[in-house]
Each structure stands twice: as structure tokens, then as C-alpha cells.
Amino acid sequence: MRVLSYRASEQDAGKRVETVLLDQLQVSHGLLSRLKRRENGICVNGRRVYATYVLQAGDQVTADVGDAEPPRHLDPVRMDLAVPYEDEDLLVLDKPANVPVHPTRDPKERSLEQGLLAYLPKEAYPHFVSRLDKGTTGLMLVAKSGYVHELMKRRLHTEDYYREYLAVADGTVTPATGTVDAPIGLADGSSYRHCVRPDGAKSCTVYETLSTANGRTLLRLLPQTGRTHQLRVHMAYLGYPLTGDWLYGARSDAIDRPALHSHYLAFVHPLTGERIECRSPLPPDMKNLIS
């Protein structure tokens, strides 16, 4: 259970409690509707009130914004998880290779969602702020409630949420730095593969060469938008697919996945205002490609 607390100021006097929840605590209209039906969802000075309750200066407002019930049922699966940062509302997960974020059609394949269900307290449920492909490694942000998840979603692709990726591409990328501004959509006849196409969604990636070796290029990739497979599609579009990317390039004996790693994550905490920074070093299988 996650309970927010707010003391009404002189400026709040005469306002309805629902106004303060929407404006000061950034509660969405959907969550406000659920709070109205939830026992002790909205309280003032420890007493349950209607959303139309008129506040006085000094009133203590509390709201139970925790998830009332899990969005769906999954069996928890205990697994080793690397968690470089965690607090009451958020955690950063360092994702291993070839583990899906969500369950797949294979009932024997475990997912990070199931692993987090075993890791988190029973009253918390993992809400992924952004997702990584099954083969991609590195840092992911996870909210422990739908309320915090919504707050973080509003910060995606702003100065309050920043990501850097490291990638290894086949060939010597030329020019060494640049911006790929090319719309992405589903490839014709596919429900999974994406491509650059004129009627696709706006997609932008900034790239920078860090080093070259063994006929490959180590890159820093900065996504300015968040399309499915964006970094992989954009590098293949330039003619330099990621090493091991069987979907947009070619399979490789040197690595069994696309050589892509979420290396750096920085964000402003939506409740505390603190800036959080996490780094994850280049994994060994990608190091071997350029050593």
C-alpha cells in the first residue's frame, strides 16, 4: 500500500480535496475515480471524505494510491535479480541477456515480470516504465504502483528521463557521428518486424562512434523517441546492423543476441525531486566483439 500525504496550505483553503489531488499530487482522473470507491481512498485528518470535501488550511490529506489488485495473475518465479537502485516507489533493474520482460507463449520460459513478483512485497506490482527487447541487456526503470508509473510515463523523452545505450555494429560506421531522423512502422506482412517507412511514427536517434576494432564499431546511442526496435532499425537503415541482430542483420557466431546494452539511466524522482543516476558496464559478450 502506498499512501500519499499532503497538508493543505492557505492557498488550498476553500478548494475541493479532489482539486488538490489532481493539481498538487498529480493524481490522474482515472485513479481519482478509483479512490472515490476505495475504502479510505481519500481521507482528511484521518477520516474518510467525499472528493467534494472543502478543505481548510492545515488539513492533512491522505490518499491510498497503491494498486488495489494485480493487473493480472502470474506465478512468481524466484530468480537472481541485479537491482542497483531501489526505494519505496521505484527500482532500477539491470536486465540479463535473453530473458523476456513479460511472459511469452512458451510456458517454460521465465520472465522478469514473474521474477519481480517474487522479489517485491505482496502489495506491490511491477509496472515497467520502459521495456527492453529480450536480447537487450542493461538498465530498466520499474514503478511499484500504477500511480508512480503514470508519473514517470509523463516524463519520458523529457529532461527528467535520460537514457544512453552502448551498441556494437558491423562495419565501420560512416560518418562517425550523426542523427537518424526516419519514421518507423511495422513492415508489410509482419506483426513483429519494423522498418523505416514514410507513413511510420516519428523516430529519432543520435549516435556517436566510441571506437572501432575487428571490423566493428562501438557506438553510443541516444534515443530521442521510443519506438519498438528503434535503435536496431535505425542502425540497419544506415547499413550498419548491430552484430548478432538476426532480425535486422545477420546471425553471428560471436554473440547470440543483438549487441545492445542500456548503459546509463538518469531520472528525476517524481515524488522527491531527487536526481537518480545509474550505470551498467559493457557486458562481457559485447566486450569480446571489440577487444
Image: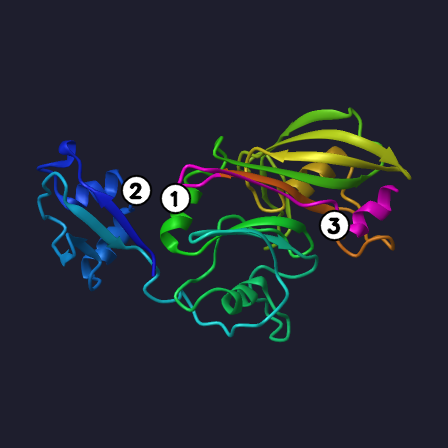
* Residue type at numbered disc 2: Gln
Q: How many residues crowd mark 3 within 10 Å: few (<14), some (14–19), many (20+)? A: many
Q: Which stretch appears magenta?
A: 268-291
Q: Cβ–Cβ below 8 Å for labels 2 and 1? A: yes
Q: Position of residue 63 (x, y in %)?
A: 24, 53
Q: Nearer the viewer, residue 162 or 214?
A: 162
Hey, which quadrant is residue 215 in on the image? Answer: top right
| Residue at screen point 64% across, 65% down | 80
Q: CA distance from mark 1 to mark 3?
A: 31 Å
Q: Verify whether residue 280 appears in magenta.
A: yes
Q: Earlier in the sequence, mark 2 or mark 1?
A: 2
Q: Position of residue 217 (x, y in %)?
A: 82, 36
Residue placed farthest to the right in the image?
214
| Residue at screen point 22% across, 62% down | 38
Quadrant the C terminus occupies? top right
Q: Earlier in the sequence, mark 2 or mark 3?
A: 2
Q: Nearer the viewer, residue 102 or 80?
A: 80
Q: Position of residue 89 (x, y in %)?
A: 42, 52
* Residue type at numbered disc 1: Leu
Residue at the disc numbered 2? 26
